Image: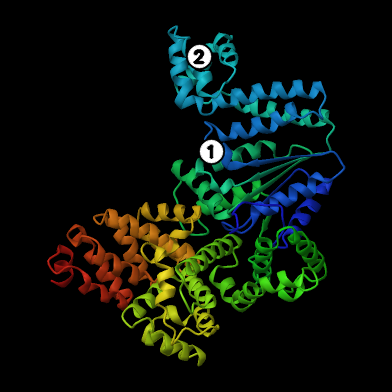
């Protein structure tokens, strides 16, 4: 089994990306700068940031590197202040700095405390405090200090006893922002610039990882904290995030400000999002998807790490040397022959040979995503162990691996094969015909006799890849996979944050036009099969619990109207499994409109219970 933690151990050949980022940071003329390391969930961002930190730590030019996990600030009342405090406190705590620097850092920490009061404190804390103090209720001051995490209450008392205390109290009670807040921000920037100069460091590099795990509010607070440092000399920020999550957070922020949302890329809101990111991120760096060769290399190294123990460092060193001379080739089984002894070499033969034969469909099916690949291999390993424990004879792991690729990449078709083989003693005749049609690349018959889902380039590749599955009794293979068949296929993997946000966006779509635009611009032919399956999982779960929810039915109907992959199959199964008497008959008109756009939707008409209102509405 393989852990799913980020590591600076480079099994992906990603060190080249870290070295490039380091080269940018080393150029003093480019500072101050903010670099965005962008990639999908599980694409290897965290590993690159870990390697980047190690590379920067090697510099002998007084570079001060700080590494933060943005998710750690999720539970704070004010993530913006928490990040600022962490950065400043690093100067106070680090032994390399002289006492004068530490004193200035402590002074800046008081400024951060006051920012917290002027931030969250307005609505949730400072308002009752100010109201109470104006009537003599000073006992609430300690409560404020406790609420804001050990805040020095003297800064509140100073403001409440100062010459301008009356105006300060009035501004808080009216929920207004004191003019001194903007002055405080300028003072903080000036004080921080002075702190860097006095510390004698050549540059400060702040690395912020896992920003995309935070809620939209916390993401924006972190970004706002970073904005405070823009144009502060000698500073560099490196942010690791899924850009889709960050974009959603910005949209969410402006939505709460009642700025009209639109899915038009030229709309005012989209321009605001783009402008915000462009001003904040000077250098966006998008991680590429792994190629077939890189996936095969990655899986080879994973198996070597699991099987070789201490000898793995020899393999890793050899791989680094290989990669310096060959950026594009596959580091595979043959490259291990002169690195490890013959016994261990032979032990790895079966696993790595299997990898080589299936690497292309694994790459295509899992979108070259390192985390998905690792999770795939972990599940594969568990099932292979189950085969041995259950003492199943004549079991071929290459067939298991091929079926699992389909399970992870196109779950609906995996279920379809399962349904076929259940009624045919494990040997579905449809599968044999599909393999024959794929060999002839007869796409039109595949599309018309079965469905367009079988006629994609991905499925043609899967059908053609050895081993062939026709004339194989598949019952044992599906028995091994029954943990997933009993629920959802993607249940073994976490649903990515961007899919949860997309689900929320669909549920609160507001109008049919927005819903249609969202599906066309963000879902149809845009999501990977794994992501689409995860989205269906959330929608099905929602309607299974609440079949009366009209807005969720409308989402499925619009999916079917726009012919989104597998939407009809999912909705058909859903109709059969929920109480039809609770389905709103009012969705009948939307279903009829969907049939006009996509005649295949007509298949669902006879699936509703004949005594339900929706059936009578559709068939009156």
Is 449 situated above or below 7?
below
Q: Position of residue 480 (x, y in %)?
A: 43, 69
Q: Is mark 2 on a helix, strand or loop?
A: helix
Q: In this view, does 121 lie to the left or right of 620?
A: right
Q: Which sits in the foreground, 538 or 588? A: 538
In front: mark 2 or mark 1?
A: 1
Label 2: few (<14), some (14–19) or many (≥20) C-alpha neighbours in 10 Å? many
Q: Name the residue under label 1.
A: 74
Image quarter in which the N terminus is found: bottom right
Q: Name the residue under label 2.
A: 141
Q: Is 421 located above or below residue 250 in the figure?
A: below
Q: Give the vertical position of 427 relative to 68 (above or below).
A: below
Residue 510 placement, left or right of 10: left
Residue at 81% across, 53% down: 23
Locate residue 411, reporting x and y percent: 43, 70
**Residue farthest to the right, as pictured:** 60
**Residue at (78% x, 67% y) in the render:** 323
Q: Is residue 527 visible?
A: no
Identify the element where label 1 is drawn: loop
């Amino acid at each position: 089994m393989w852990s799913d933690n980020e590591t600076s151990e480079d099994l992906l050949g990603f060190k080249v990306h870290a070295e490039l980022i380091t080269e940018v940071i080393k150029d003093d003329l480019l500072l101050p700068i903010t670099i965005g390391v962008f990639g999908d969930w599980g694409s290897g961002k965290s590993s690159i940031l870990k390697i980047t930190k190690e590379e920067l730590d090697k510099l002998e030019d007084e570079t001060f590197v700080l590494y933060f996990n943005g998710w750690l600030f999720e539970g704070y009342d004010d993530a913006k202040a928490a990040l600022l405090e962490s950065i400043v406190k690093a100067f106070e705590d680090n032994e390399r700095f002289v006492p004068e620097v530490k004193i200035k850092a402590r002074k800046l920490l008081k400024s951060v405390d006051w920012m917290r009061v002027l931030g969250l404190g307005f609505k949730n804390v400072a308002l009752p405090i100010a109201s109470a103090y104006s009537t003599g209720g000073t006992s609430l001051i300690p409560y404020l200090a406790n609420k804001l995490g050990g805040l020095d209450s003297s800064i509140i008392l100073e403001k409440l006893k100062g010459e301008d205390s009356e105006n300060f109290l009035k501004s808080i009670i009216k929920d207004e922002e004191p003019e001194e807040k903007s002055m405080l921000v300028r003072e903080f920037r000036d004080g921080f610039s002075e702190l860097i100069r006095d510390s004698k460091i050549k540059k400060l590099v702040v690395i912020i990882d896992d920003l995309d795990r935070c809620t939209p509010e916390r993401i924006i607070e972190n970004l706002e904290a970073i904005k405070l440092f823009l144009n502060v000399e000698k500073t560099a920020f490196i942010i690791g995030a899924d850009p889709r999550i960050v974009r959603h957070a910005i949209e969410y922020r402006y939505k709460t400000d009642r700025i009209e949302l639109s899915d038009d890329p030229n709309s005012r809101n989209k321009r605001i999002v783009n402008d915000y990111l462009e001003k904040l991120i000077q250098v966006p760096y998008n991680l590429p998807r792994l190629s077939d060769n890189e996936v095969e290399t990655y899986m080879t190294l994973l198996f070597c790490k699991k099987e070789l123990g201490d000898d793995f460092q020899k393999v890793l060193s050899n791989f680094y040397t290989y990669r310096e001379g060959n950026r594009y080739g596959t580091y595979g089984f043959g490259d291990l022959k002169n690195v490890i002894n013959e016994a261990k070499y032979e032990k790895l033969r079966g696993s790595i040979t299997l990898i080589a034969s299936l690497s292309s469909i694994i790459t295509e099916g899992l979108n070259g995503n390192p985390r998905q690949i690792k999770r795939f291999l972990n599940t594969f390993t568990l099932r292979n162990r189950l085969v041995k424990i259950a003492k199943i004879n004549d079991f071929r792991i290459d067939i298991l691996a091929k079926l699992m690729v389909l399970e992870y990449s196109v779950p609906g078709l995996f279920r379809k094969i399962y349904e076929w083989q259940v009624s045919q003693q494990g040997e579905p005749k449809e599968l044999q015909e599909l393999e024959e049609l794929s060999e002839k690349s007869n796409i039109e018959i595949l599309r018309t006799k079965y469905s367009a889902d079988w006629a994609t380039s991905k499925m043609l590749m899967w059908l053609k890849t050895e081993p062939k599955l026709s004339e194989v009794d598949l019952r044992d293979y599906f028995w091994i996979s029954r943990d997933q068949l009993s629920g959802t296929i993607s249940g073994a993997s976490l649903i990515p944050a961007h899919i949860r946000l997309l689900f929320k966006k669909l549920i609160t779509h507001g109008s049919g036009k927005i819903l249609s635009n969202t599906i066309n611009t963000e879902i149809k032919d845009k999501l990977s099969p794994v992501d689409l399956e995860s989205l269906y999982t959330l929608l099905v779960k929602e309607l299974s619990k609440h079949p009366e929810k009209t807005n969720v039915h409308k989402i499925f109907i619009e999916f079917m109207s726009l012919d989104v992959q597998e939407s009809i199959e999912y909705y058909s199964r859903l109709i059969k499994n929920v109480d039809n008497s609770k389905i709103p008959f009012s969705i009948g008109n939307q279903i009829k409109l969907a049939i006009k756009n996509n005649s295949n939707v007509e298949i669902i008409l006879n699936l509703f219970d004949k005594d339900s209102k929706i059936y009578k509405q559709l068939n009156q």
